[in-house]
Amino acid sequence: MASGGSAIRGSRVGAGPMGEQDHGFHADRIAVQYWDALGNETVRYFAAGLPEEEIPEIIDCPTSGLPAGRDQANPPQLAKNEPYKTHLAYVKERRTPEEAEQLLEEALQQLRIRRGTAVAS
């Protein structure tokens, strides 16, 4: 079988001449540099007409995961994370042991009433 190929094999439909620069409108943009505590630089691009207060001061660095700021001399430091607290730890912060004992006794009394095993006091 002869290989008489198609002229458009490997081309996308509607493709123009190579190097065509007319593929749409490119909006003006500005480059903003961010640095993390390890010195990694990240560049983010924003629309040129964007107000300064809408450009974030701190981003997460994709290289290190650390926070990155716009001031190279003073990059933001990693905030100290609080250890994970369980629901019980939060409850213990709100209740004294005496209050907890009273609530437990009330809940047990209601359960006994529902089950029909409550003792008259």
Image: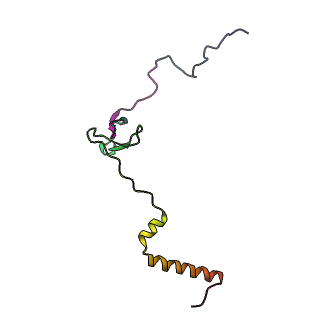
Q: Is residue 19 above or below residue 120?
A: above
At 63% across and 81% down in the image, what residue appears?
A: 114
- The quadrant of the image that shows the N terminus is top right
Q: Is residue 118 above or below residue 46?
A: below
Q: Residue 75's spot in the image, x, y percent?
A: 30, 42
Q: Please, which residue is most extreme toward the right here?
A: 1
Specify whether 54 is left or right of 62: left
Magenta span? 19-37
Specify whether 120 is left or right of 40: right
Report if residue 56 is visible in the image.
no
| Model colouring | rainbow
At 40% across and 56% down in the image, what residue appears?
A: 82
Residue 8 is inside the magenta segment: no
Q: Nearer the viewer, residue 25 or 65?
A: 65
At 41% across and 37% down in the image, what residue appears?
A: 63
Residue 32 is inside the magenta segment: yes
Q: Please, which residue is most extreme toward the top here?
A: 2
Q: How many marks?
A: 0
Q: Residue 44's spot in the image, x, y percent?
A: 37, 36
Q: Please, which residue is most extreme toward the front here?
A: 97
- The quadrant of the image that shows the C terminus is bottom right
- Assign the magenta stretch its main secondary structure: loop
Q: Residue 58's spot in the image, x, y percent?
A: 34, 44
